[in-house]
Image (cartoon, helix red, strand yellow):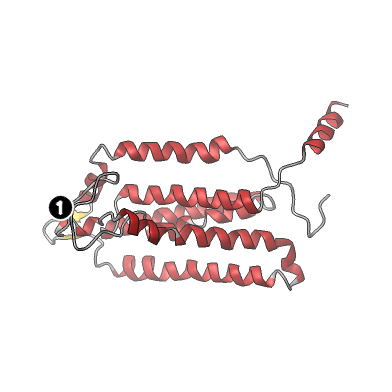
Amino acid sequence: MPTALERPYSRPLNLWVCLGIPAITAMVLLLLELTSLDMDIAKMVYDPLSGNFIGRHSYFLENVLHDRAKQVVIALAVLSFVGFVGAFFIQRLKPWRRELGCLVLSMALSTSFVTPVKVVTSVQCPWSLTEFGGKETYSELLSPRPETDKPGRCWPGGHAATGFTLFALFFVLRDRKPKLARMGLIFAFGLGTIFSIGRMLQGAHFFSHNIWTAVFCWLICLGAYYAVLYRPVPKKAQVLNSQTVSG
């Protein structure tokens, strides 16, 4: 039996599922670039009479679901960092030191990658496009960007990452609290989805932008877990267990 300070062994990690589903999702998203799905969805939430997206000036979507909600997640990240530092000194937190460190690392990486990638890709937001009252020209993700004085900063979705970064909760709790881990996964997926829909209603992102963000955040959190926390059962212990069962 592991001691209070010893990490538990990890349940087997099915990489075919953990990596296969994101890979399939990415391939589907690339194929969707050949369709008009993103534009069609955006047109559904655009009001041509007012010349704005239906949520463009919504107090709730901008001030509550965007600004305040982001602040809450940032506060959680700060508390996680404080907890991680405290785990070096506070006896109760010491058994969770690696988990807290993994949580901090996951949240830091899955939010900080967004801005540099936005700069590199220069994808325009829906509200900037001529189709929706803007001045910029639409281009597919893998197509060259049209000449402009104002490069886009809309791929991947930053606010979606604020929600999907909490995939980290699933991995951090996976080995110690499986039920809480599943609840964390549902919460992260739900929050990221709500944030994504809110920004789509405002014209800030296309549908695919947010799905790409979910894929990236999942892979980052998975990678952090695998590097920091994953502890498979040693092969010798597996052999002994199988011999005990057979005997």
Residue at 33% x, 59% y is 119
Percent x, y of residue 170 = 58, 52
Left or right of 176: which side holds 158? left
The quarter holding residue 247 reads top right
Q: Which residue is mark 1?
A: 131
Percent x, y of residue 162 = 44, 61
Q: Residue furthest top?
A: 246
Question: 10 Å neighbourhood of mark 1: few (<14), some, or many (≥20)?
Answer: some
Left or right of 220: which side holds 208? left
Residue 50 vertical position relative to residue 208 in the rendered view, above or below: below
Residue at 22% x, 45% y is 40
Q: Secondary structure at mark 1?
A: helix
Q: How many numbered discs sit on the rendered protein?
A: 1
Percent x, y of residue 20 = 50, 36
> Is any atom of residue 214 visible in this view?
yes
Residue at 82% x, 34% y is 241
Percent x, y of residue 8 = 74, 50
Q: Residue furthest left?
A: 49
Left or right of 221: which side holds 213? left
Q: Amino acid at mark 1?
A: Glu
> Is any atom of residue 195 visible in this view?
no
Residue 8 vertical position relative to residue 24 in the rendered view, above or below: below
